[in-house]
Image (cartoon, rainbow, N blue to C red):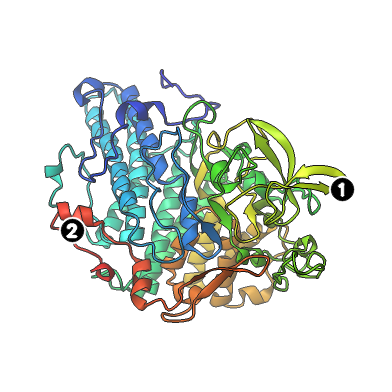
Amino acid sequence: MRNLKITSTKLFVPILAGLMFFVSACQDDLLDQQPTTELGTVAFWKTEDDATFALYGAYAGIRPLFDRDYYFEGHGEYTRVRGTSATSGNLRLGDAYQGANYDPSGYGDDFDKYYRYLYGGVHRANYVIENTRKLMATANPNSQANLERIVGEARLLRGMVYFRLISMWGDVPYISNVVTSNAQIADIARMPIGQVKDSIMADFTYAYEKLPVKSTELGRMAKPAALAFRGKLQLYWGSWNKNGWPELEGFTPNATAANEAFTAAAADFKQVIEGFGLNLFRNGEPGNIDALGKAEVLPNYYYLFTPVANGDPEMIMYFTHGGPGTSQGEELMRDFSGRSHEGSQCWVSPRYELADRYQLTTTGDFAPAMVPMNPSTNAAARTVPNSAVNPQSYADRDYRMKASIMWDYEMSIGMAALKSTGWTPFIYRTWAQPVTIDGARLTTYNTDGSNSGYVFRKFLRNYAGQGRSDGDYAFPVMRLADVYLMYAEATNEVNGPQADAIALVDKIRHRGNLPALTSDKTSSKEAFFNAIEQERIIELVAEGHRGFDLRRWRALDRVWGPPASAGVWRIDTWGAQQTRYYQNTPERTYQQNYIFRIPPGERDRNPNLTQNTPWL
């Protein structure tokens, strides 16, 4: 990377520039975000290579704001996030995700750190945009197109950051220039969400116009990413205008604006789907699947979340990682697996209720609900039909189930000291114990992170050789499958179920080896929405979407019951009650879950920052 000549076969990992330019860019103070530390702007910004080098630094600084979005999955009902892993040796600039609350409720006042770090991302992008524009004024004409591309990538990154900011806080301060002192923005007020949205749209549109159709460097963005994010922004704008956002003072929902936004979103998604020759990973085929209790052959969906999928056309936008020896590896193993896998910590695990969402390959519909049973007190629990601890209850399910989660007697490869320890069977509450299965002496999966009876297989590497924090998987923040489902949602909002949208949902279902939707699932706008939501739950599980979906749909009451109700228990496969959420929860807490608190520390420093009404 020193000569900045990245070939089509080289993995772009935006690291080295970050070391030079951005090591101190995220301090505790939002207004103390200096974007340079080593070279002055006058000395550095001379050539096209300088601009490219700085862009890599922006990728490096913004990646830690998105590449562990799976923690946000805890704000939904199907994934438990019991905490976040420490930064270890990885350069994560302080780790914006730490210290926050990823429970299904009571989280809106715990993202002050994330707010500050998001603005650090804004400043990094602004640094590249502003200085590259200056460079364009005197640069060789042959460099202009590439410099415009660099500005386009930086604007897309900036747009992504502001999109996240308005999704959580609504009205936010908008900063579009390089900040060199606190005094420059010490009194900046919050901009209405509609104006911020328009600025994000301008960023995404510029990026779409200037980026290449396809990037030759793994990790750099191209036109489909800009168009997909523009469509997603419009989908959210449509959702907010349709469903309302009463917690955001001054925001008035508008049915006409909603319909226009859904229509525009559908047009952008349609162009992504049809205009760039993209396809689902391995053509969306389900692949092969091993028998229950075996894992030598896993469905294609499983491999979509391993490094073999890096750079695949389904991955429209992703952040690359360096792998072993770089201090830039992803921590998916550490977060999703247990002690028997390189001492991992299982910070993220499926909840019991997720299992019943996986439909039958035979009917394409839901199986009878599983029945929790305690095998320590019920000798027949392992053989009773539909028992949650009977492995046969999981037969003939959506292939994505075996690719995503593990239940009792499912296998994975244990790992220690970068070497395989052989097959490790998961048996709930039987941690690190000797067991004989089919004549083989094995040691059971060891974890202190599962309280449901399940652990994730998704994101779990099936090979040794990399430590728990040394993964080189390129984490996706925009996949083609998500675009399919968002397109279906947007068109359904405007015109109800449409044939092309139904066909796309069926393509997603096909990767789970499910039959096409039956006519009753597409008979009305409401029925088709339910089918789309079902696929979003299963297809996108543990990728960080569910909490944002619930908020934009205003679905907390639907999922958890109305304010002051009895609440909803989360249980395990043995029938034990683990946690009850939303018990006697007042309406104010619901409101606070829909919109986040503007950090008090920032308001102390800036008297013009107003507070969201549920937090007054």
Q: Nearer the viewer, residue 28 or 214?
A: 28
Residue pushed farthest right?
A: 439
Q: Which of the pair 408/538 is nearer the observer?
A: 408
Q: According to the image, label 1 marks what residue?
A: 438
Disc 1 residue crowd, few under 14, some 14–19, many 20+, Cα 10 Å: few
Residue at the spot 77% in from the left edge and 65% down from the top edge: 393
Look at the picture and state if 221 lies above or below 574: above
Where residue 511 sits in the image (x, y, percent)?
Answer: 68, 54
Residue, disc 2: 609
In this orientation, does residue 260 appear? no
Where is residue 161 drawn, in percent x and y? 35, 48
Labels 2, 1: front one: 1
Q: Is residue 460 above or below residue 483?
A: above
Residue 291 pos. (x, y %): 81, 52
Q: Disc 2 and disc 1: Cα gap in Å? A: 65 Å
Q: What element does badge 1 sit on?
A: loop
Decide if residue 485 is on the left or right side of residue 302: left
Residue at disc 2, secondary structure: loop
Query: Residue at image x 22%, y 57%?
Result: 600
Q: Amino acid at mark 2?
A: Leu
